[in-house]
Image (cartoon, rainbow, N blue to C red):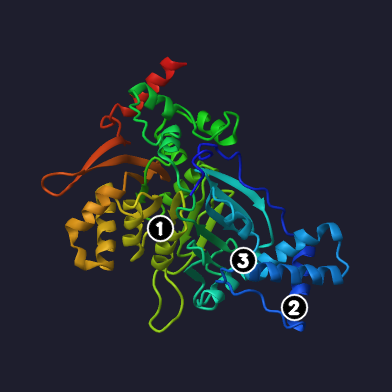
Amino acid sequence: MDNLGTSLIHPSSPPIIQPLNQSDLSLIERVREELVLRGINPPSWREVDPEKRRRFFDEVRSILIDQAEDRLAVNRNALIITDALSGIGLLDQLLRDPYVEEIFVRNGVVAVEYDGSFYHLGKLADDRYFENLAVHVADQGGATLRGDRPAVLIDLPGGERFTAIVPRLSTEGTAINIRTFGRRVRTLEEMEQTGTFTRIFPSDLDMVKTFAINPEKGVGSESSRRFRSLLNTPDRFLAWMVSTLSGSLMIAGEMGSGKTTLLNALSGFLPVSAPIAALETFRELEIQHPFLLRAVAPAELSPGSSGVTLEWVLNVIYTRMNPAAILVGEVVGDEALQFLKATCLGRKALTTIHGGTIEEALMRLEQLALAAAPELGLAAVRSMVAMGLDVVALMGRINSSGRIQRTLQAIATIKGIDANGNYRLDYLYRAEGEQNTPVFELAYQQLEEMK
């Protein structure tokens, strides 16, 4: 437990960790080989006796001295090697900090959630280092991370939850998440100080102000500039929704209507200060984000074939890897149910689906979810859709003077279910003109008055 006299002291930032270069990795391998020659075994992964770990550290230090390593760097190198061979490598340094709440690794780049804030620590080692680390942790935990099992979910000795997805399932290098639980007890005074119990009732004007600006920190940021440059058209609402992660969005439309094109474009407004996950049955999305977990898996497997499905991967990611938002390239099979489960657990999700109208798209989503779990029944699935999905946008192919144009046809919010069990849809926008509601016009008018 925290010392009550210091629990209100807010840490300034996460610890600084020096990246491992190729020389460091080569040194780890040389010392590993020497330890084998000397018959010295690293402490068991679940060893809790600090004295055994200390003796191993001294053995490693002795080898470094015998090999005439730089005396000034001996202690640092001995710690790196000890962590690499008996713990979880570089990441052990983060686990020793009580303010680290979650550790993220994406293709060698490390980030942490540190006392409620997200920090990028940079590229700390080559991706191969973290892939080997994940395999080592899996072996120590009695699991397998090879062949047709490209993901592992186990608990570390301290109770932390370790999840890893490796290539080729992860197409952007090794992805690791480590969640810590209750290592630092917060006092009620600290929770009050950080606003846990503050009740805020924003006025309508406040909401318009939120809509008017980009939430990314730094008014001069590229995403802020792009957001402000958008015209007073419905796409600005969608950009605001994505940039604030204000809800879950499904983009519907017939084949070739521009669903994926719109999803790709909106992905450029995802907040850079948040971990994002993208899942597809084949690589189609073009997402530019500095901290991306990306996986490609089939919607289903042939009888007798090994591997994992998109449904399985989606379940692992939303339950274990804590993404701020999940992008599913297209909902086409049993993953529809996992998509809905994720949104009902508060995950923000974006996807595409086939459907000629918004109502048809919702019906298709229901059918796919029911195919995965028919025992749920339509009423339960419809409740999940209404609870988890916030906005549906419809793209369409319009024949104009012999030329096909792909245009946004409608935007609707789901306001729950009526007494007859049907969706209550509130259309914010329709392309026909006279059916447009004044939502956008009113918002933009208020924005102009604020200037």
Report if the CB atoms under discs 3 and 1 are less than 8 Å apart.
no
418 versus 138 height, above or below: above
The circle drawn on residue 35 is: 2
- Residue neighbourhood size for the residue with mark 3, other residues' Cα within 10 Å, grouped as few (<14), some (14–19), many (≥20): few
For residue 283, say whether it is visible: no
**Mark 2 or 3 closer to N-term?**
2
Element carrying mark 3: helix
Callout in the foreground (2, 3): 3
Number of numbered discs on residues? 3
227 versus 404 height, above or below: above
21 versus 304 height, above or below: above
Element carrying mark 2: helix
Distance from label 3 to label 1 (Cα)? 50 Å
Q: What's the residue at 31%, 52% (across, down)?
A: 344
**Mark 3 or 1 closer to N-term?**
3
Residue highlighted by disc 3? 50
Report if the CB atoms under discs 2 and 3 are less than 8 Å apart.
no
**Mark 2 or 1 closer to N-term?**
2
Left or right, 136 with respect to 247, comes to right
